[in-house]
Amino acid sequence: MAAVSLSVSTVKPLGDRVFIKVSDSDQTTAGGILLPDTAQEKPQVGEVVQVGPGKRSDDGSRQAPEVSVGDKVLYSKYAGTDIKLGGNEFVLLSEKDILAIVN
């Protein structure tokens, strides 16, 4: 089986999919206790890296996505597919799984 080399620039989401770079999780608690990797929760905030062309409507036209590259977003906890590229964590998910744009 041939190895495939992927980078962020080679991944282009289809339809209403969005490619998000996951923000780093907290390493310590509010009290200053250091958390091991197994105790850290998966972050639900990330930055949009790539956006698909949009969802097709009933008449065949495309609906433009509500998010754009560079937006910081909050997404559902168990949504999407987790992907690791070059030591960074990414999530590929549908636009409907994005809950809010964070300022």
Image (cartoon, grey):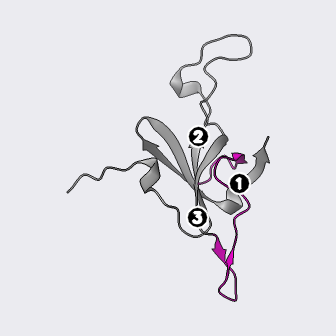
The residue to which callout 1 is attached is: 98
Mark 1–mark 3 Cα distance, whole angstroms, equals 14 Å
Question: Which label sits on residue 22?
Answer: 2
Image x and y of residue 15, in percent: 58, 70
User: What's the amino acid at mark 3?
Assistant: Gly
CB within 8 Å, label 1 to label 3: no
Image x and y of residue 53, in percent: 60, 69
Q: In the image, which residues are magenta?
A: 54-80
| Residue drawn where x is 67% and y is 61% of the image | 95
- Image quarter of residue 58: bottom right
For label 2, count other residues whose C-alpha is less than 10 Å away and answer few (under 14), some (14-19) or many (20+).
many
Mark 3–mark 2 Cα distance, whole angstroms, equals 18 Å
Task: Give yes or no for residue 56 being in the magenta stretch.
Answer: yes
The residue to which callout 3 is attached is: 52
User: What's the amino acid at mark 1?
Assistant: Ile
Q: Quadrant of the N terminus?
A: bottom left
For label 3, count other residues whose C-alpha is less than 10 Å away and answer few (under 14), some (14-19) or many (20+).
some
